[in-house]
Amino acid sequence: MITGNLQGGTSGIGAAVAQSLAQRGAQVILLTHHAPSDPFLVDYIDDLRAATSNELIYAEQVDLSSLHSIRLFATKWVDNAPPRRLDMVILCANTLTPKYGKKAVTQDKLDPAWGINYLANFHLLSILSPAIRAQPADRDVRIIFGTCSSYIGGNVRALRDTREPLPSGKEYGGSKLAVMVFAQAFQKHLDAYERPDKEAINARVILVDPGLTRTPGMRRWLTMGSLWGLLIYMVTWPLWWLILKSPVQGAQSFLRAAMEAELGRGVGGRLIKECREVDYLKTEVRDEEVAKKLWGFSEKQIEALEKEGAVRRAVEKREKEVEKKEKEKEKKTDSSTSSGNVDGAPATSGNGVKTPGSRRSRKAG
């Protein structure tokens, strides 16, 4: 049995990868920002189980736009004893802000391209690293990154110490280049680990470029986030149907990276582009100095953002507690007022003694 964590497994190429792995009997754990009880996710998993005749399909909640959510999921996974089986991690999640689209930010107020496409993967794998290294030496573990040719136009040599560290206008390409630089560095990080049993580490990092594919992200890019763009896209749909691959076709590169036996041997950090192994077109991908600076920058930024997030959550928690106490106080005040004046009857003292001038005291007199 193969157990794999899969990002972006509910649409596009990720959904096709999830279905293909499930059909082959793999245990698939979908990492999604939806809660496991979400009706959409429940129906999606039920349909996927029925279509693949595989009941070993689950979902765990992790919001890639929140560093706190990533830490909660990853630490829970790592803290499990004995270590949970993990054969592969497939990182398909991706976001793109089109030219005329509305600018958004993550929960940590980061640019989405940087925060979701890169920093979320860095944070996730940094915490999951002990779980990956704890796998048996005879287990073929693979960490598969999704990328694309946009990395050629990216630049990570001059990162700005802001919430938008990438050069303006090149955020998407820069995020893809950052992912590829980190992938190489993470492979070296795994190779440097000395196992207690003295066996060689058997984890391989593989990068995958599926080519131009009909995915939601590709549609947003082609339409540029405008209604006119969407109209033109719909009119020219037959052309795009001929030019672009289907999600199933795009998934084949990921499936080769996941199942090709030869890729589990030798050096890691190889690039599979449209099912063929190719070399990188930018020297920064294998530049150790660039990787060192990027790793250090990412760690410092995450540390600062998590501290800020912890303070913000503490303040919000305190405000909610104060608000709750005030509501309870108001409720008690309203309750005591109404109970003391039922049907116009005067209130009695706390020890049950009738107050002077009450109807019962006059009768008793």
Image (cartoon, grey):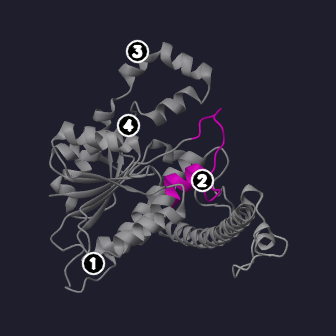
- Give the numbered dot on residue 12: 4
Reading the image, the residue beneath label 2 is 106
Q: Is residue 162 magenta?
A: no
Front residue (pair 111, 169): 111
Please say whether residue 37 is visible from this viewpoint. Answer: yes
Front residue (pair 259, 74): 74
Mark-to-mark CA distance, 3 and 4: 19 Å
Q: Earlier in the sequence, mark 3 or mark 4?
A: 4
Query: What range of the chain is rendered magenta?
Result: 97-119
Q: Earlier in the sequence, mark 2 or mark 3?
A: 2
On the image, the x and y values in percent for residue 164 come to 66, 55
Mark-to-mark CA distance, 2 and 1: 32 Å
Q: Earlier in the sequence, mark 1 or mark 4?
A: 4
Q: Amino acid at mark 4?
A: Gly
Mark-to-mark CA distance, 1 and 3: 53 Å
Residue at the image point whose x is 67% and y is 58% from the top: 163
Q: Earlier in the sequence, mark 2 or mark 1?
A: 1
Circle 2: is it few (<14), some (14-19), or many (20+) Cα within 10 Å? some
Circle 1: is it few (<14), some (14-19), or many (20+) Cα within 10 Å? few
Reading the image, the residue beneath label 1 is 81
Depicted 352 relative to depicted 145: above or below: below
Q: Earlier in the sequence, mark 1 or mark 3?
A: 1
Circle 4: is it few (<14), some (14-19), or many (20+) Cα within 10 Å? many
Q: Amino acid at mark 1?
A: Ala
Horizontal side, residue 175 vs residue 243: left or right: right
Quadrant the N terminus occupies = bottom left
